[in-house]
Amino acid sequence: MDQTAKDTFYVGVNDRKIDLFEGIYKVPNGVSYNSYVIIDDKIAVMDAVDEQFGDEWISNIKSVLGERQPDYLIIQHMEPDHSANALRLANEFPKVKLVGNAKTFVMLNEYFGTDFAERRVVVSDGDVLSLGKHGLRFVFAPMVHWPEVMVTYDELTCTVFSADGFGKFGALDADEPWEDEARRYYIGIVGKYGKQVDSALKKLSALDIRRICPLHGPVLEGDLARYLGLYSTWANYIPEEKGVVVAYASVYGHTKAAALLFAEKLKNLGCNVVLHDLARDDRSVCVADAFKYSALVIAGITYNANLFPAVREFIENLTERNYQKRFVGFIENGTWAPVAAKLMRERFGNANLNFAENSVKVRSALGEDSRAQIELLAREIAENI
C-alpha cells in the first residue's frame, strides 16, 4: 500500500465501471474515491468510499492495520461517493467513533436513519483532534460544495486532506494532464461557489502546506503553488489564457459554416481559437473551455421562436456557474424572424461580462452582408483580448 506521508496510507479505490459522474459528467477514464489511514497512538480513517466498493475499501484498511482497529472515521463530506460506507465501517469496527460537524450528523441521520449519538465526536471550526503525534485541525469550508464540508490539516506532516477540493476526474492510473480534468471537475461541480472557495483558500494560506490529499485524483506534492494558484484563478473567475472559444450549433450546416469562417478570421488575426460543436462535444468540456479562455463567441439559430436547445443549455450551464469577466459576442442565424442573438444576450442577464458591439446576422446562409459582419466582429474580438 502506498504511503503518502509518514504514518499515512492510501486505502481508496479506483472506479473503472462508472460512465457518468453524478449522473452528468462523462468519465471515460473512471474516477477514484480516495480514503486515507493515519496510524498513531490512535488511528483515524479519513473518509469512506462509494457504496459498491465497500468490500475492497474494508480490505484495504485491514491490510494496513493488521490486528489493530481504527479509533475514528473522519467524515469531511457527506456526498454518497464519500460517505456511503460510513455505516459499514461502524458495523465492522464497533468501537470506532465518527467525527464530523453538527451538519454532518444531521445528514448521517437522513441517509442512514441514525446520527450515531453514542459514537459521535462533534467538532467546531478550528478544533484539533489529537491522535498522539498527529494533531488533526478541522477547517470548515461550507459550500465547497456542500454546507457540511470541512477539510483537515495534519499538523505533524503539514498535509491538507482537502475533501472535494483539488480533485479531478480519472482513476489514479489514468495517464492524463492534471489541469484538464481538474478544471472540468472544478468548473462543473464547484464552479458556482467561487466566493466560498476563495474564502477557504484564504484560511489555508495561513498554514504550512506540503501535501494535499483530495477525495478524487492524485495526492499533490512538489510545486503546490501551481495547484493553489489555479484554484485561486478559478475561484475568482479569472481567465487562464487569452483566446476565443467559438461555440456553435447547426442544423443544416450554414451556422457551422459561419462559425468556421469566423474562427478562420480570428486565427488570421493571431488569436488562439478553440472550436466546439455544442450538439456533439462533451458539454462539460465546452463549459470548462469557456472558463479557461478570455473570450467567447456563440453561433446559434432561432429554433421554435427560441434558442436551439444545445445553445440554451450551454448558456444555462455557464450562468449557473457564475460565468463572468469575459468578452462575449454572438452570431445568429434565422430564415425568418431571427431572435437568437437577442435571446442569447438576455440569457446572460446581468452577469459581469463585456459584450461585443458588433454581432453577425446570417439570413439562412452566408452572404455578402454576413461575411462583412463576421470580419467586423472578428476584429473587435481580437482587439479586446
Image: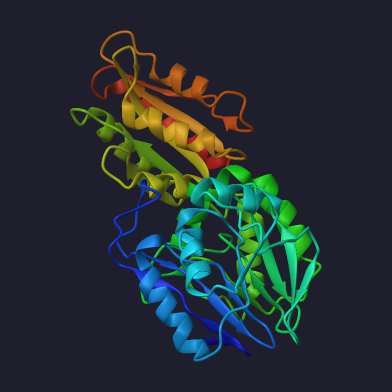
- Residue 220, above or below 257: below
* Location of residue 7 with respect to 275 vertically, above or below: below
Closer to us: 16 or 166 = 16
x and y percent of residue 191 in the render?
56, 47
Q: In which quarter of the image is the N terminus?
A: bottom left
Residue 110 image-quadrant placement:
top right
x then y, percent, for residue 371: 33, 27
At a point 26% along the width and 42% down the height, the residue shown is: 280
Does residue 300 appear to the left or right of 133 in the view shown?
left
What colour scheme does the image use?
rainbow
Q: Which of 357 and 139 is in front in this view?
A: 139
Residue 215 in the figure: left or right of residue 98: left
Q: Is residue 149 above or below residue 362?
A: below
Front residue of this view, candidates 59 and 262: 59
Residue depicted at 52% across the width and 88% down the height = 65
Residue 217 drawn at (x, y percent): 47, 69
**Residue 127 in view:** yes
Residue 197 image point, x, y percent? 67, 52
Residue 169: image quadrant is bottom left
- 176 vs 380, left or right, is left
